Image (cartoon, rainbow, N blue to C red):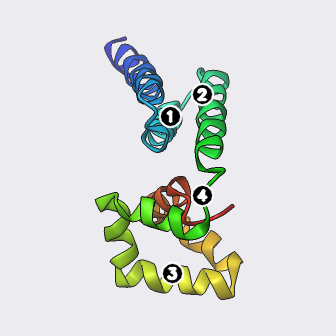
Amino acid sequence: MESMLMYETTVKGYIRKSNVLFAMRDYTKAIEAIQEASDHDEDHKHTSEIQQQEHKCQQALFTQRSGENEEETLQRAMRDPEVANIMNDPVMQQILQQAQGNPSALQDHMKNPGVRQKIMKLVNAGIIKT
């Protein structure tokens, strides 16, 4: 029973964190928090709430970036130290180059949780377009 309570608290906690970050207009981190909630929602009890929050965050992010060109997006994204580290990582550079030539190769790399997390960070930052 205690572990179930911990599970509920963790998922709801990430949902709340996403809502707070959304209110602060930090949409990228709000998306990361809601993705964390999704990862912890093993019983899929909160799927609807998570999907609604993620959609709300994605829409806000799209609206925020609608006036940016690619150069401005890259400059903004590179101000985030985590994004800069990912972009300067030789392994990630190789993966991104492979993905440009063969987009299906990216699907294979997404099976690695560490790479998946980094790629999602780049997607959320607007560097990788889906």
- Lower position in the chain sequence, tag 1 or tag 2: 1
Are the residues flagged by discs 4 and 3 in contact, CB closer than 8 Å?
no
| Residue at numbered disc 4 | 68
Q: Label 4: state its secondary structure.
A: loop
| Disc 4 from disc 1: Cα separation | 25 Å
| Disc 4 from disc 3: Cα separation | 26 Å
Q: In this view, does 65 lie above or below 3?
A: below
Q: Is residue 126 left or right of residue 88?
A: right
| Residue at numbered disc 1 | 34
Which mark lies nearer to you, 2 or 3?
2
Q: Type of residue at label 2?
A: Gln
Specify few, some or many for label 4: CA neighbours under 10 Å numbering under 14, 14-19, or 20 or more: few
Q: Residue at x 39, y 26 (%)?
A: 17
| Residue at numbered disc 3 | 95
| Picture quarter with the C terminus | bottom right
Q: Type of residue at label 1?
A: Ile
Q: Type of residue at label 4?
A: Glu
Report which quarter residue 86 is drawn in: bottom left
| Residue at numbered disc 2 | 53
| Disc 4 from disc 2: Cα separation | 24 Å
